[in-house]
Image (tube, rainbow, N blue to C red):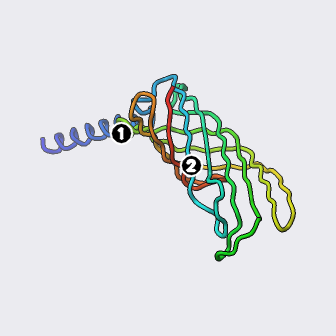
Amino acid sequence: MKKKLVLALLIATLFTGGAFAQEWYNSYAPGIDGSSILANVGVGFGVLSGYKMSIPPLSASVEYAGLPIPLSVGGYFGFVRYKWDFLGLTSDWTLTKLTFGARGAWHFNFLQDLDAYAGLALGYLVYRYSGFTGTGGTGAFDWGFFVGGRYFFTNILGAYLELGYSPISFVSAGLSLKF
């Protein structure tokens, strides 16, 4: 009898845990419905060594979160300008980066009001330099990855934080909008 009770509790625990596990990685957070458009506007942090930001990393993204699986797809744009500064020595040398492309994120349903996600970005990076070596610039394909979360204070307005690799910053934070 004792063995049957233990076996029944073990099976019930496995099925309950499996149902919970299905829920957190296989659905959007409760505030994200089947046709949400999510927009982020923010400022980045994380400076290249030997450089000082003259214009901080600015970024914007828009994603459509209406697919039958918890995957959002959209685009992004970013801009930053650095000025050379090494050991307090500065110059007129500047580096400007402009990036744009596509991004996608898988959403997780951990907490009631938190939209947690992880994703990839693929795009194009244009950079231009000017200073003591002259001026020039070029472009190249670039990629990035990120993990982040959005917390909505109202049905429309919230805040976001993303960590990861991008051509302009390692951390980005700002406002989120939901339409």
Name the amino acid type tagged 1. Answer: Leu
Task: State left or right for residue 152 relative to residue 45.
Answer: left
- Residue 63, disc: none
**How far from the left and from the top, in percent, is residue 99?**
71, 46
Vertical comparison of 143 with 62: above or below: below
- Label pair 2/1, CB-CB below 8 angstroms: no
**How far from the left and from the top, in percent, is residue 2?**
13, 44
The residue pinned by badge 1 equals 111
Query: In the current view of this chain or complex, which residue is farthest to the top?
Result: 35
Name the amino acid type tagged 2. Answer: Val
What whole-number distance in Å separates the C-alpha atoms at marks 2 and 1?
25 Å
**How far from the left and from the top, in percent, is residue 35?**
52, 22
Vertical comparison of 152 with 170: above or below: above
**Residue at point 63%, 39% (across, down):** 103
Task: State left or right for residue 120 relative to residue 16.
Answer: right
Q: Quadrant of the N terminus?
A: top left
Task: State left or right for residue 89 relative to residue 68.
Answer: right
The residue pinned by badge 2 equals 43
**Residue at point 45%, 29% (across, down):** 156
Return the residue nearer the eye: 141 or 2.
141
**How many numbered circles are shown?**
2
Q: Quadrant of residue 158?
A: top left
Quick one: label 2 or label 1, which is nearer the N terminus? Answer: 2
**Residue at point 71%, 44% (across, down):** 123
**Residue at point 49%, 46% (across, down):** 148
Element at label 1: strand
Q: Is disc 1 surrounded by few (<14), some (14 to 19) or many (20+) residues within 10 Å?
A: few
**How far from the left and from the top, in percent, is residue 74?**
62, 34
